[in-house]
Image: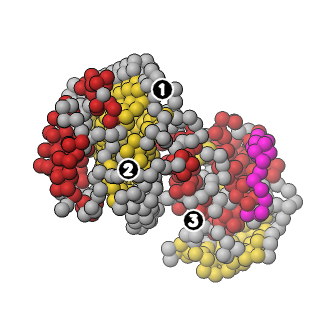
Amino acid sequence: MDLKDKLISSFMAFENNVDIDSPVHDQRSEAIKNFEEKGFPSKKEEAWKYTSLNSLQKIDFSIFPKEADALDYKDVKKYFINEIDTYKIVFVDGIYSSFLSETTHDGVDICLMSSALTKPMYKQVIDVYFNKIASKDESLTTLNTAFSREGAYIYIPKSKMPKKPIEIVHFSTGNEASLLLQPRNLIIAEENAELQVIERHQSLTENEVLTNSVTEIFAAKNAIVDYYKVQNDLSTASLVDNTYVNQKDDSVVKVHTFSFGGKLTRNNLNFFQNGEHIDSIMKGVTILGEKQHVDHHTLVHHIQPNCESHQDYKGIYGENSTGVFNGKIIVDKIAQKTNAFQQNNNILVSDKATINTKPQLEIFADDVKCSHGCTIGQLDDDALFYLQTRGIPKKEARALMMYAFANNVLESVRIPELKTRINKLIAKKLGVNLGFDL
Amino acid sequence: MLKINDLHARVEDKDILKGINLEVNAGEVHAIMGPNGSGKSTLASVIAGKEEFEVTQGNVVLDGEDLEDDAPEERAHKGIFLSFQYPVEIPGVSVTNFMKTAINESRKARGLEDMPAKEMLKLIREKSEMLEIDRKFLSRSLNEGFSGGEKKRNEIFQMAMLEPRLAILDETDSGLDIDALRIVANGVNKLKSKDNAVVVITHYQRLLEYIVPDFVHVLHNGKIVKSGGKELALELEEKGYDWIKNEAVV
């Protein structure tokens, strides 16, 4: 039985375990119908031309994992930003770990999707927001919707801000030979609210894992959302991340994506600007080696006038790694005075590495500023020679140049400890100790 | 200190240096002049160890040691410094962090610990004042958006920080106005001592009014065709390079 059939037949069993009276039930049923019709995306589709899910579909993934043994905090501490105090929503093989988590209901809700989907007190919010911005026809998003049950639920009321950043961490233990995870996150920042989220997926063994995640983010008027995705998983872990962001007037949403590992990573990052004077910021640093593959697909839909979007993705590709950047910007006819900026710069450090980069602009308004640029290059030999003549060995000189190349993406990271962590990860990925404080 | 013996070098099958002989001793200033395309910058790059150039014959010897197998950084660790005609822009690395890295890598090569931060700051302050460099300048990305003059001054600042035994200044005067030229020359003169040596590569005599050479060599078509004292530079300025070319043909 292939993975698609297995999923469809598992849906019945899944339904038996969840509350079918819930309004979410209808949405799940609609969603599985869509997935049944469309199936997994194939390379024939333009959006999946460079990313194949074929080999993953041949794996016999477990869909309902057994509860794994509890993890010791000291064994997984390094995967948290442990230098600072954070709220934590932690899942082990898809199952909530109360032991590793630190949730709250103190003025803000930082808790679980499973509670939000079942408890009456959340019904109103779920009715208004759940599955409202996520695609109803993109097949992997609907697959997630069909099986949506667990994940992070974050609700920040008007003018509130959590006392500390929130970490959403998914561990997979290898308890199953191969595991499919489908976390579903809902994040709501009401008017003038602000929050910071760090998301991470981490395999603890080399058993195969595929995560198909959906995150819906709603930023109301004047809200600020700062979202960091740390993708540094083992080379047996694959991730499809579908993130949908809905913004209202004067809101600012920033998503940083740090892709340093994993077997196959696909980031579908979609912004919808439903208001004026909105700023949407997408930044990415990708550093890959081995046979790793990362595909960044971004979409910014400028629906209203006077908004901005900024995209800056840097990629460094070594060994046999492959990368994709596809940045789509749609500017509606009424979205005058839009300022959309997109930049994708790449360095190939190996003859066998590949990058496919494509800007895709659909502009229907006539008074807009849209700029885009993509570059693919090697490290400049003259610059390397220059650094060497100052006594910096070639390996360090290369690292310094690559570090410098990625550096400006880090400037906008607002959690200093995270920035230090990312800096160290970059230095480690590049295999050197840089001679100055990061 | 530096001895160049019958040096031949080529790039992509094109012979550029065709038998250079030159000896530079500690405490000396040498000027290498010559028309465009005579091989001046190539000579500088070959001494500094640029891989693009293939040495086909002869060698470069520093303190009795053949440098043939040394990478550019190893030559730097041995005390060779090249001030670039066109310094490269490195966005994202500040002048200060760059200098810290460079100095500590050189120290590491000599088996020394990193320079303490306090000492480093003091050194940076001292040398930047000598070259009349604004402090703000030091936190900017290396050479990015610097004017021609700022780039050259920054080169000499790096030289001052690294205190090389042999400094090669490749067309350091090009693009400098007279005020900047004075500051740069003044910096070089302050760094000069009986233990180090300077090789000034230039097309014009102007810089040599400020950095006075002990020897002047004229490079033409990959060879040193004439050597003399500082008065040779004046003669070149007056007569141009054509007579040298003609003399060489004869």
Residue B118 is a magenta residue: yes
Q: Amino acid at mark 3?
A: Gly
Q: CA distance from mark 1 to mark 2?
A: 31 Å
**What's the residue at 75%, 45% (across, down)?**
B117
Up the image or down, A304 lies above or below B10; here it is: above
Q: CA distance from mark 2 to mark 3?
A: 75 Å
Q: Position of residue B203 (x, y in %)?
A: 65, 57
Q: Which residue is mark 1?
A: A162
Q: Which residues are magenta?
A: B109-127
**SS class, disc 3:** loop
Q: Which residue is mark 2?
A: A67
Q: Nearer the viewer, residue B231 or A263?
A: A263
**What's the residue at 46%, 28% (across, down)?**
A104
Of the 4 image quadrants, the one containing the N terminus of chain B is: bottom right
Up the image or down, B110 lies above or below A214; here it is: below
The dominant secondary structure in magenta is helix
Q: Which residue is mark 3?
A: B37
Are the residues at dot 1 and dot 2 in contact (C-beta closer than 8 Å)?
no
Q: Position of residue B242 (x, y in %)?
A: 62, 65
Of the 4 image quadrants, the one containing the C terminus of chain B is: bottom right
Is residue A274 toward the left or the right of residue B18 in the image? left
Q: Position of residue B148 (x, y in %)?
A: 60, 45
Q: Judge the density around disc 1: few (<14), some (14-19), many (≥20) Cα neighbours within 10 Å.
A: many
Q: Which is closer to the viewer, label 1 or label 2?
A: 2
Res B167 → quadrant: bottom right
